[in-house]
Image: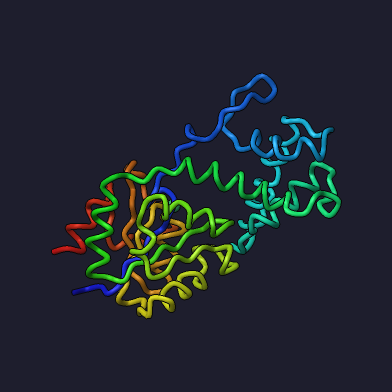
Amino acid sequence: MRYTAVLFDLFDTLVRFDRERMPEIEVSGRRVRSSAGLLHALLRDHAPTVGLEACYEAGLESWREAERLRAIDHREVSAPARFRHFFRRLGLDEAALPPGLGQALIDAHRGALGRAADFPAHHGPLLRRLAARYRLAVVSNFDYTPTALDILERAGVTELFRAIVVSDAVGWRKPRREIFDEALGRLGARAADALFVGDRPDIDVAGALAVGMDAAWLNPERAPLPAAVAAPTFEIRDLAELAAILEP
Ligand SMILES: [Mg+2]
């Protein structure tokens, strides 16, 4: 068999993020999908001057700032760091708030995201068959490992993966080699014996190829390959096509 290990990206590969499943709120006369209503409900009693709109804007701003920092060198900005920025934006001193409130906000946000992740029904049987033949791992760029674990648990597939590696725990995001190396190390697999499956050419394909893995690009929209990215080993429209590659 050509591979001993298969590693998967999480969002838009194993699960699809469905924004329509996020709570709907009204901000400045607009309907938006956001966890800000949940955060506001938790904050309201302790910071009565903070309105829903301010919560929404601070959430957005903290996300933008985290994305700005991540783009510099692919270092992950964890959820606790992002929420410290959120409190600062609201002019709140986190130390003066009740202990555990910051964690409660992170958990509320985590819950909303977890419920918005859709696990396609045909992915379960496929992963189960692959787990019988290959060592499987998840390698995800995400700011909070418990959210990724929730999503896999809800999908009923956690036990199929020998390693679940999320960037907040590693400190580095794909395409940095550190996070791929961590996953391969935990699988006890060599890069040359591993296939990486992901939807982002610049992150998943480029990162995996750079460490010496083969890469399957999940490209359902038939997007053109960016000029800067080397061609993936395989290109697929749906995860189901892995059967032809991995179960000859
Ligand atoms: Mg992805």
In the image, what residue occupies the spot 48% across and 32% down? 20
Tell me where residue 25 appears, x and y as whole percent. 61, 27
| Quadrant the C terminus occupies | bottom left
Which residue is at the far left? Answer: 248
State the colouring used for the structure image.
rainbow
In the image, what residue occupies the spot 80% across and 50% down? 98
Task: Tell me which corner region of the image, top left, top right, bottom left or bottom right, holds residue 99.
Answer: bottom right
In the image: residue 216, left or right of residue 86: left
Tell me where residue 167 appears, x and y as whole percent. 54, 63
| Quadrant the N terminus occupies | bottom left
Tell me where residue 177 appears, x and y as whole percent. 49, 71
In the image: residue 102, left or right of residue 67: right
Which residue is at the far top? Answer: 29
Q: Nearer the viewer, residue 106 or 73?
A: 106
In the image, what residue occupies the spot 55% across and 32% down? 23
Q: Nearer the viewer, residue 23 or 170?
A: 23
- Relative vertical location of residue 142 with respect to residue 58 in this rendering, above or below: below
In the image, what residue occupies the spot 51% across and 58% down? 141
Tell me where residue 110 appears, x and y as whole percent. 57, 48
All told, the count of numbered labels is 0
